[in-house]
Amino acid sequence: MTDGQEPIRDIAHLGHFEIYTPKPDESLWFFKEILGLEETDCHEQSVYLRAWGDYDRCTLKLTEAKRAGLGHVGWRTISPQALDRRVQALDAAGCGKGWIEGDTGHGHAYRFEDPDRHQMEVYYESERYLAPPQLQAKLINQPQKFTARGAAVKRIDHINLMCSNVTPNREFLQGTLGFKLREKLQPEVGGVEEGAWLSVTPLVHDIAYTRDFSGNRGRLHHIAYWVDSREEVLRSADVVMENDIFIEAGPAKHNITQAFYLYLYEPGGNRVEIYSSSYLIFAPDWEPITWRKADRGRGVYWGGTLPESFKTYGTPVVAASTAEKGDLFVFDPA
Amino acid sequence: MTDGQEPIRDIAHLGHFEIYTPKPDESLWFFKEILGLEETDCHEQSVYLRAWGDYDRCTLKLTEAKRAGLGHVGWRTISPQALDRRVQALDAAGCGKGWIEGDTGHGHAYRFEDPDRHQMEVYYESERYLAPPQLQAKLINQPQKFTARGAAVKRIDHINLMCSNVTPNREFLQGTLGFKLREKLQPEVGGVEEGAWLSVTPLVHDIAYTRDFSGNRGRLHHIAYWVDSREEVLRSADVVMENDIFIEAGPAKHNITQAFYLYLYEPGGNRVEIYSSSYLIFAPDWEPITWRKADRGRGVYWGGTLPESFKTYGTPVVAASTAEKGDLFVFDPA
Amino acid sequence: MTDGQEPIRDIAHLGHFEIYTPKPDESLWFFKEILGLEETDCHEQSVYLRAWGDYDRCTLKLTEAKRAGLGHVGWRTISPQALDRRVQALDAAGCGKGWIEGDTGHGHAYRFEDPDRHQMEVYYESERYLAPPQLQAKLINQPQKFTARGAAVKRIDHINLMCSNVTPNREFLQGTLGFKLREKLQPEVGGVEEGAWLSVTPLVHDIAYTRDFSGNRGRLHHIAYWVDSREEVLRSADVVMENDIFIEAGPAKHNITQAFYLYLYEPGGNRVEIYSSSYLIFAPDWEPITWRKADRGRGVYWGGTLPESFKTYGTPVVAASTAEKGDLFVFDPA
Amino acid sequence: MTDGQEPIRDIAHLGHFEIYTPKPDESLWFFKEILGLEETDCHEQSVYLRAWGDYDRCTLKLTEAKRAGLGHVGWRTISPQALDRRVQALDAAGCGKGWIEGDTGHGHAYRFEDPDRHQMEVYYESERYLAPPQLQAKLINQPQKFTARGAAVKRIDHINLMCSNVTPNREFLQGTLGFKLREKLQPEVGGVEEGAWLSVTPLVHDIAYTRDFSGNRGRLHHIAYWVDSREEVLRSADVVMENDIFIEAGPAKHNITQAFYLYLYEPGGNRVEIYSSSYLIFAPDWEPITWRKADRGRGVYWGGTLPESFKTYGTPVVAASTAEKGDLFVFDPA
């Protein structure tokens, strides 16, 4: 918003994300049996999935590839007009890559890149999920039956992208798409910005950018699905342990966003978060929270710390740059 | 939205509600000690309160009066311009009552009435809560310390107003303020609309209108505060029982909105809901859910039923009309 | 305990129960997929099952029969000597029926009847469950993997038997087996005893006797399995609803025993409880709690009521006697 | 049990513990306002407290002293005869210290020491708590009102004592008092026993002995109170954080005992655990679980680790012996 103009409010929500996996069968098993997603479609090298509470036809596209990592992020606009406006803004910013015809679950979409070259798209037309008879819920306001399978995550929540420099990526989303900055990690006044949490909805973040301490760029930190209670996160951790999935951190509570988190590596190597708690922001004039070193106590809220890998591990998995690495945990899905 | 126009998106969220109580001391005790709200201000016959997670200075105004009931509902706009637009629309609809200078916690506001004559206001300027030292939270993104007092509700959620005829009230909010209809209770096709759940945010409802089966108009059904888990609703029920507060229904789960609810009567007679679970709607083109008789099973989700009072009891407490009453429960705060 | 003698402490715990079902396939589906039990053995007309946290080989024997109802209840003694002592006492009481050779999961057992002719047995030798490789838990102190299937109940908890007259049955268990009375429902001083909750462990009840208001005798009220939290009971209710299992009552909280309950009818017609919360009794000199009419408020703890069927429905399903029936709910599995 | 003899079953349960504090006012504030205990009595330098679900008059005796640490542990027997038998056994073992007249809440008691010289006592007569009118619960089977204050712990659970050598202490309790070994930590076959978890009840442990890696003896590791759900442990952690209480570890899940734990240091320096989950043992012939190094994964169940202080910090606070210390955290309440 500049000079009394009203803010851009054209993006409705995070629609879906696509991730790559070098182990498609194992990854698919994980997302269906452990995370509890439902497979809705399958085309070529991709499987499309959604959580039981997702009312869109697809929120995760899982694509076979040589290396793990982000395929793309899809943002839905509030209207066709809003889509046109955003395409103009993206074009003007010189980051547009052109239209695609659409994909399973949504209509034509405009592709673009953020400064770190993460692939994204905006679209409006979206297909609502219709449950087949055996998956129809007893509640007509619930998109499908509660299957109670595995962690049984409820809905897509957010994505976290690692980047070489948080600031330009964050400013790009604010400037071209109207994202609002909710929280920021900048340990020293005037120092490097290590993380930014942004949203277009009342969720604290639809997307986060965090610094890639390995010195790389364009990588995926994690995708996140929501469950309704902290108890469900704990239960998920029990499920995950029994199925030999690597837990990197949690269950515990973040300072930033107040999230109650559990971080896993799915068999393809991508980090996945099972997420709950946190808080909602309805204020149109929210003042971003800035976290300094002194605000974070010993690390996470109750006093634990995140492992070093949390700052350096991402997908694709790459060797850390020599300058800043700590005790780098290297998870090699190969 | 008409003919390709984009929808009105000028209301940001439910800001506050004012309720009347004939028993100000007992009501204040309830809201502070049992619901766990924080008192922030006190002027003349009113006390101003907020939940520990509310970042506005005030979300409940509790005013001494001869009878219980609704004072008014306050809606915050997304900008000053949006406020101007809504005032014009309200004026054009002939339901405007003029500006007031403001109140504790917010700037000048425009008063109006819905068709059932419930008092409402729109405003933009809102004061952010600043915790005094003894109430400062360890988390800088949390407006105040988690006090863990009583039910320790987290934030304002919604309001439910009873009305003689749901349809015109519902259409009024849609037409003048841009509320979106999320769910509707209309037992018979073409029959009477018994309830409507509307919102401007991703919450399933910021406001509901439900039919007053006593034949009265302009009454309050309930105000609702949020807690983060169903377990906290259960815990609240234990707290409430130990303190001789009347539980009308719950804890249980609604079909409509999927809410996990607990309905109480505060000592002044107003119904209060402690609320969790439910679901969020991010889709810009949500198709309202219509509940028919056959969709609701035996009543509420797991098979219980709501007491008759749920359809006829509201504040102010009045005698039921003879035509439609069932086994009317009369709670007399006098 | 008489005249300074020390109390009988020979029964260790509830070992297992056998129930009959006229619909063996549907019942087995329910116990495995919905309740989440594990099938361990299958002989002739019976399937043997246990919960993931049960360390014995079998806690439920499900037997095909013409009508639903109780097969028998198995009590494990603390030692072989204790078994001998109890057999002597049962013989002396004239209710013994002789030894059986044993069954899957336990050694030779002595059969007897309570005054209402419910079949029971005492035994000492019990087989500990050894999980096959695919079901081995990551925790060596957990008998098997947490499967997270359906309600995923954790362990056997208790049984509730209906009887024509509570008092003699209750006194029989106290006198011959050393059960301790924990709570008692006797609405009027000197009036009829409507329920008795007894245990040999710190659980509030390993067994309850409740009055059969239909005027019948020897029937089963319900069997109960434990989950660790109230949230899991709620989650179970969601699972159950999606699978067309009839919920008779709950989730809610009893006054008596403080149980958080959910009552279902399994497809064969037997009532099953999913149970949590409650409290433990360690005192060797616990004074039984006696509930009078005035102590129970409106019914169950938070104000709801149990349906009439709770007092009259049992298995086998029979017509109610004319004298005392209310609005009898008849569930007919045929 | 030797040669066919039946096992000793004379101890009913952990009755109470006494701890010393050099900061009586701050400690009392912690136990009342943060842990949520109720003060029942106060004599000389001691305050007596209990949890809302404790039916005994007192489960914690808090005594002013120069240094923090254990006062004594009180075990209740099942009968007066059982008390006599245990006194004979203790005398025979040469560890008896003689009778005391009794204390608030219990009758005459026999004092003794374990090999590490932790002070203990056995007694039978115990006073049941009677709530004053303002603390009477709505439920007649609940010893007092649920106050919902602070963590609102429900009942006493267990105690953990550090010792120079686990084995003789563990064998002492087994031999003289009939404690049953439930789990044991012995990382190497034939190696040093680092921990033993014992009980006389179905709880996994009424007492644990763990090795004092600082090389000291006779110290207190922690006292523990129970809450009914993991969610309540998490909530307690939030309460504790807001009140500047040091969290040493958790909330997280142990491998051993399957406990869901939160470890705090109360202002006097003693470690306190808020505890839930775990499992119950009813089998009379339970085979102790032995944990080897390979069974414990990375530390605690979901992959975190306990801080070094967990092995070396105890009360009284003392300097670590030079031989075995790691990064010793020294909490100095002075």
Image (cartoon, coloured by chain):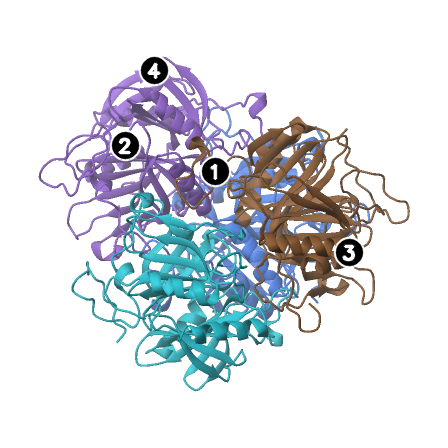
Chain colours: A cyan, B brown, C blue, D purple
- Disc 2: host chain: D
Mark-to-mark CA distance, 4 and 2:
32 Å
Q: Image check: C103 left or right of C68?
A: left
Q: Residue reaching furthest bottom?
A: A44
Mark-to-mark CA distance, 2 and 3:
87 Å
What residue is shown with label 4? D45
Task: Residue B130: give its label.
Answer: 1
* Residue type for callout 1: Leu
Depth-wise, is mark 1 or mark 2 nearer the camera? 1
Most foreground residue, C188 or D32: D32
Mark-to-mark CA distance, 1 and 4:
42 Å
Q: Are marks 1 and 4 on the same chain?
A: no
- Disc 4: host chain: D
Query: Which secondary structure, mark 3?
Result: loop
Query: Which secondary structure, mark 4?
Result: loop
* Residue type for callout 4: Gln
Q: Position of residue A68 (x, y in %)?
A: 32, 75
Residue at (48% x, 40% y) in the render: C200
Establish if B54 lies above or below A134: above
Q: Are marks 1 and 2 in contact (CB under 8 Å)?
A: no
Depth-wise, is mark 4 or mark 3 nearer the camera? 3
Q: Position of residue C272 (x, y in %)?
A: 59, 55
Establish if D157 lies above or below D48: below
Mark-to-mark CA distance, 1 and 2:
61 Å
What residue is shown with label 3? B93
Mark-to-mark CA distance, 4 and 3:
74 Å
* Residue type for callout 3: Ala
Mark-to-mark CA distance, 1 and 3:
38 Å
* Residue type for callout 2: Thr
Q: Are marks 1 and 3 on the same chain?
A: yes
